[in-house]
Image (spheres, coloured by chain):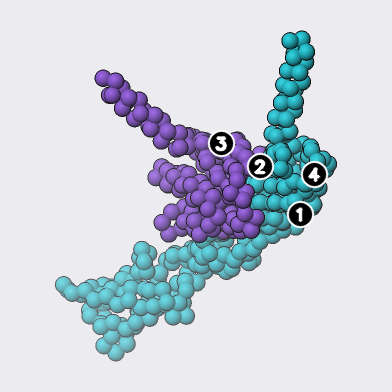
């Protein structure tokens, strides 16, 4: 009995730990400007690809590997993140961006279908280490304005900007 | 015991001060405009290292603690949220700062679609624009974007649209006359131009005439035009169909210099019709 209780307890803890690593995601009804209708499937793909981009960004900035941005970022967003990675590498700095929660709303689907803009009220932990030593961790709550564009197989982030205005 | 209490209190106080020194908050502005100079007030003394950390930019600098650390104009320019740390051998101080897009527009991306379309199409042309500052930050504060579509031989269409979250869009009608239109998006003194080709639409009507040519019939259309009077481009296919008894023969002819012409066998009592796409022209019954 005790053994099975321990097993259940350990299993629950593992589940909780697993759940704790995954960000909580809330998607609001789109508040669209523009004449183009947004299909559910498109909206889901855009949000999923955007959430995935946080993982790519975290890995790329943590490992200082710009190639990890290729799948999810394009254009100015990719250039800025790659420049940050270059600076981090030169300075011996690593950063980890662990997203805790997202509250996403699609704001704009351009008439020609070549861009989708969304806002994300995001909470994340940023941890910075320098010379292999952790310097500190901050919890950040901010709003991101993100523009994604369609590519061959997925939506990629073209503009990725925290915006507190 | 009495002597021990002040010692304990002073020890606790020292501990609190020490704890503050290890994790103190930095005094710095909550937000700045992109590229603006600012200063960070640090506590302590001696040398330290400043880190300004964000996904969009990273700065690391050696600094002198205990005074103002000046961040020069143009140093921190990518809009976003930044975590700030100053570390030394004995302390770590932290803070945060938001970098906001500069207020003045310096660039815009403008997409006009389609690049070619038929004349007289209501809301057939769309334009969308995103507005950026000189550092490539999306300006999310509302700005007025002016869209203008200038068609040859007619008054320009103009719309002024306020950006929402950095984006603005509009729709325009294509002109009644064929030709190249200039589609311009403008914010302040920044503009971007696209060319939109407007081509004739479907033929409005097709009319052919027939005359004998030996043992054949010479069939010729009038110049083929769309409903706005624009000539249909050469190469557009016109189909002539001759029906006689149980047989039917069809010939596709491309427009040349605006007309289509063909000779078909002359059969008394044959019916000949002409069409282009979905537009059906007149019908002739050959009686000779």
3D distance between C-alphas at marks 4 and 3: 35 Å
Residue under the point 28% across and 73% down: B241
Query: Quadrant location of residue A15?
Result: top left
The chain under label 3 reads A
The chain under label 4 reads B
Chain shaded purple: A
Q: Which mark is residue B83?
A: 2
Q: Is residue B223 above or below residue B190?
A: below
Q: Which residue is mark 3?
A: A123
Foreground mark, 4 or 3?
A: 4
Q: Position of residue B22 (x, y in %)?
A: 70, 34
Q: Which mark is residue B129?
A: none
Query: Considering only order in the chain, which callout, 2 or 4, is on the residue closer to the N terminus?
Result: 4
Q: For the residues tagged 2 and 1, is the chain the same?
A: yes
3D distance between C-alphas at marks 2 and 1: 18 Å
3D distance between C-alphas at marks 4 and 2: 22 Å
Foreground mark, 1 or 4?
A: 4
Q: Which residue is mark 1?
A: B74
């Amino acid at each position: 009995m005790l053994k099975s209780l321990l097993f259940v307890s350990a299993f629950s803890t593992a589940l909780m730990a697993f759940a704790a690593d995954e960000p909580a995601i809330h998607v609001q009804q789109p508040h669209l400007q523009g004449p183009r209708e947004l299909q559910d499937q498109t909206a889901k793909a855009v949000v999923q690809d955007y959430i995935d981009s946080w993982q790519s960004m975290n890995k790329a900035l943590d490992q200082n590997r710009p190639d990890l941005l290729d799948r999810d970022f394009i254009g100015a967003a990719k250039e800025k993140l790659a420049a940050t990675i270059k600076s981090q590498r030169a300075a011996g700095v690593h950063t980890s961006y662990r997203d805790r929660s997202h509250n996403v709303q699609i704001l704009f689907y351009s008439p020609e279908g070549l861009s989708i803009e969304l806002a994300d009220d995001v909470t994340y932990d940023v941890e910075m280490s320098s010379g292999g030593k952790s310097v500190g961790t901050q919890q950040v709550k901010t709003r991101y304005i993100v523009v994604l564009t369609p590519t061959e197989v997925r939506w990629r982030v073209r503009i990725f900007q925290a915006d507190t205005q | 015991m009495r002597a021990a209490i002040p010692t304990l209190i002073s020890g606790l106080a020292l501990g609190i001060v020490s704890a503050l020194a290890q994790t103190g908050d930095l005094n710095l502005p909550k937000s700045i405009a992109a590229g603006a100079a600012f200063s960070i007030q640090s506590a302590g003394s001696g040398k330290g290292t400043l880190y300004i950390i964000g996904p969009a930019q990273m700065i690391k600098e050696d600094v002198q603690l205990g005074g103002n650390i000046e961040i020069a104009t143009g140093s921190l320019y990518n809009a976003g949220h930044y975590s700030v740390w100053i570390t030394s051998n004995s302390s770590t101080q932290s803070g945060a700062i938001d970098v906001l897009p500069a207020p003045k527009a310096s660039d815009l991306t403008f997409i006009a679609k389609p690049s070619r379309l038929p004349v007289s199409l209501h809301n057939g042309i769309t334009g969308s624009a995103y507005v950026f500052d000189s550092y490539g930050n999306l300006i999310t504060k509302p700005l007025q974007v002016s869209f203008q579509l200038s068609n040859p031989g007619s008054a320009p269409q103009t719309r002024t649209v306020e950006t929402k979250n950095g984006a603005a869009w509009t729709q325009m009608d294509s002109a009644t006359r064929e030709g190249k239109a200039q589609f311009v998006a403008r914010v302040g003194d920044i503009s971007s131009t696209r060319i939109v080709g407007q081509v004739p639409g479907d033929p409005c009507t097709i009319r052919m005439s027939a005359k004998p040519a030996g043992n054949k019939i010479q069939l010729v259309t009038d110049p083929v035009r769309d409903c706005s009077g624009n000539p249909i481009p050469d190469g557009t296919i016109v189909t002539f169909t001759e029906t006689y008894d149980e047989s039917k023969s069809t010939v596709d002819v491309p427009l040349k210099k605006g007309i289509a012409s063909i000779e078909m066998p002359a059969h008394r009592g044959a019916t000949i019709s002409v069409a282009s796409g979905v537009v059906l022209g007149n019908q002739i019954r050959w009686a000779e």
